[in-house]
């Protein structure tokens, strides 16, 4: 089975790494998925063991900054690897890919103290990062409504507020907190500050389930938490710009992992159709079954092309805001389509934990909300495309990107 069907085929070493990751996922991770989905103590022991093996195999942090251990400098090349990491819901954590975005952000914008206290252990797999933006009393899609505050006091920043649905907060060593550091214009009002989770005043309030399953999202609170002044990421008041920078890379990284899950659902569905059981029902001959195969394949192939487009523009440092949002929405749709069709073909078995499909189905639903809801992204892309016409122009599809300078999402 060839891994590459896209015109933007990767060179070595990306192809070699993608094959290695795929073998690791198929032979070491997928057989242990029931254990990884189990109660939290044994699941995290299993995850730690597999992460150690991934490190020994040289498969850890493959898209960390090239100067700090990453083996691939091009996002477009890494996409081939990320898809393979994403074939299991547990893959991104096992290969250290959950921390990729933070390694780039901390390296680019961190002070010496941040690099020493947070980045160094993160790169070694000795720390777990999390990101605290969403709040119970705020609208996630509208940063202007965020209320968590950070004020300058003697010795540093004092934070107060509450965040929720924070991934990995149950095991994180630190949280990058988006906090309000000034009144007035949103552009200068928000900042990002790193908060260690063992500092006085930090609390995990409760775990939050996602469609009935606990996967590490928590509500957390900060009561007069004080951290040193140089735990500020970048400059004070630049929080909104940093959020947009995070989302640009973060959406592509996540979407690549979702595409891997979608491809796995597609593989499972097609194997089932072609199995003895499928043959008994003569599934290959049914037009509706072929339609499900067609629709899943189309959704995956379309999302993959969009993701590569966004990644190539990222690598070329071109404006890729529209492409990233298109690709993120397309990857969500591909995953939802592929898992839904696969469940349909599996019948009742697809609905219970005898197959991985029920867990993937829950994950698929979340992808339409986290990292920017579909509705907000679609709305932002539509507005930006129309901007080209509002001034009497046309959108030239042959240009490398939509016109720069229009309002970003
Ligand atoms: C599994 C999971 C993990 C998460 N992990 C994290 C994390 O690690 N850190 C973190 O900070 N947050 C995290 N979140 C929260 C996530 O970022 C927010 O849920 C997301 O930003 C949406 O915000 P909201 O839930 O407040 O929804 P809202 O912004 O209130 O949106 C709700 C609905 O309102 C409508 N809407 C909103 N804006 C528009 C618009 N512009 N145009 C049209 N319709 C619109 C849409 O129907 C939208 O779905 C996670 C969420 C989930 C589900």
Image (cartoon, rainbow, N blue to C red):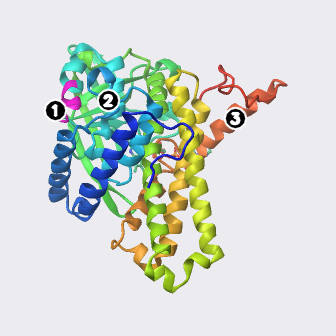
Q: Which residues are magenta?
A: 120-126
Q: x, y percentage for residue 103?
A: 31, 28
Q: Quadrant of the N terminus?
A: bottom left
Which residue extends farthest bottom? 280
- Closer to us: mark 2 or mark 1? 2
Q: Nearer the viewer, residue 146 or 6?
A: 6
- Closer to us: mark 2 or mark 3? 2
Q: Quadrant of the C terminus?
A: top right
Q: Nearer the viewer, residue 177 or 157?
A: 177
**From mark 2 to mark 3, how far is it between C-alphas?**
38 Å
- Disc 2, disc 1: CB below 8 Å? no
Dot 2 corresponds to which residue?
Answer: 71
Q: Quadrant of residue 230?
A: top left
Packing grade of label 2 (10 A; few <14, some 14-19, many >=20) is many
Q: Earlier in the sequence, mark 2 or mark 3?
A: 2
**From mark 2 to mark 1, how far is it between C-alphas?**
38 Å
Residue at disc 1, secondary structure: loop
**From mark 1 to mark 3, how far is it between C-alphas?**
44 Å
Q: Is residue 146 left or right of residue 22?
A: right
Using the rendered image of the protein, determine whether residue 37 is visible from the camera's viewpoint. no
Residue at disc 3, secondary structure: helix
Q: Earlier in the sequence, mark 2 or mark 1?
A: 2
Dot 3 corresponds to which residue?
Answer: 383
Q: Is residue 213 above or below residue 137?
A: below
Q: Nearer the viewer, residue 379 or 282?
A: 282
Residue lying at 43% horizontally and 66% vertically, measured from the top left: 268
Q: Quadrant of residue 288?
A: bottom right
Residue at disc 2, secondary structure: loop
Residue lying at 69% horizontally and 38% vertically, measured from the top left: 382
């Amino acid at each position: 089975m060839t891994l590459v069907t896209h015109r933007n085929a990767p060179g070595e070493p990306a192809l070699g790494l993608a094959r290695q990751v795929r073998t690791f996922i198929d032979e070491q991770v997928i057989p242990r998925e029931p254990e990884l989905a189990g109660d939290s103590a044994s699941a995290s022991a299993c995850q730690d063991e597999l992460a150690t093996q991934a490190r020994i195999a040289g498969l850890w942090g493959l898209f960390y900054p090239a100067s700090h251990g990453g083996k691939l400098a091009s996002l477009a090349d890494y996409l081939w690897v990320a898809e393979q990491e994403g074939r299991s819901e547990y893959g991104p954590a096992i290969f250290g890919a959950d921390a990729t975005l933070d390694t780039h952000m901390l390296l680019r914008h961190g002070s010496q103290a941040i690099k020493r206290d947070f980045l160094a252990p993160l790169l070694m797999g000795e720390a777990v990062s999390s990101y605290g933006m969403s709040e119970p009393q705020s609208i996630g899609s509208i940063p202007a409504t965020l209320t968590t505050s950070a004020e300058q006091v003697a010795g540093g920043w004092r934070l107060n507020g509450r965040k929720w649905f924070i991934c990995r907060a149950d095991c994180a060593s630190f949280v990058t907190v988006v906090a309000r550091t000034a009144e007035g214009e949103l552009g200068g009002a928000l900042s990002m500050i790193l908060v260690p989770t063992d500092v006085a005043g930090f609390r995990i309030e409760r775990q939050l389930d996602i469609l009935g399953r606990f996967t590490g999202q928590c509500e957390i609170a900060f009561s007069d938490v004080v951290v040193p002044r140089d735990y500020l990421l970048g400059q004070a008041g630049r929080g909104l710009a940093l959020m947009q920078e995070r989302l640009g890379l973060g959406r592509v990284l996540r979407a690549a992992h979702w595409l891997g899950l979608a491809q796995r659902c597609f593989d499972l569905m097609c194997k089932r159709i072609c199995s003895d059981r499928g043959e008994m029902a003569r599934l290959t001959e049914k037009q509706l079954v072929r339609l499900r195969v067609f629709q899943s394949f189309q959704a995956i192939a379309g999302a993959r092309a969009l993701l590569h487009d966004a990644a190539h523009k990222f690598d070329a440092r071109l404006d890729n805001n529209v492409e990233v949002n298109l690709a993120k929405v397309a990857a969500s749709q591909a995953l939802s389509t592929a898992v839904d069709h696969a469940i349909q073909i599996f019948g009742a078995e697809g609905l219970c934990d005898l197959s991985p499909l029920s867990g993937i189905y829950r994950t698929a639903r979340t992808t339409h909300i986290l990292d920017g809801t579909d509705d907000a992204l679609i709305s932002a892309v539509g507005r930006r495309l129309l901007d080209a016409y509002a001034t009497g122009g046309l959108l030239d599809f042959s240009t490398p990107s939509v016109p720069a300078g229009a309002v970003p999402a």
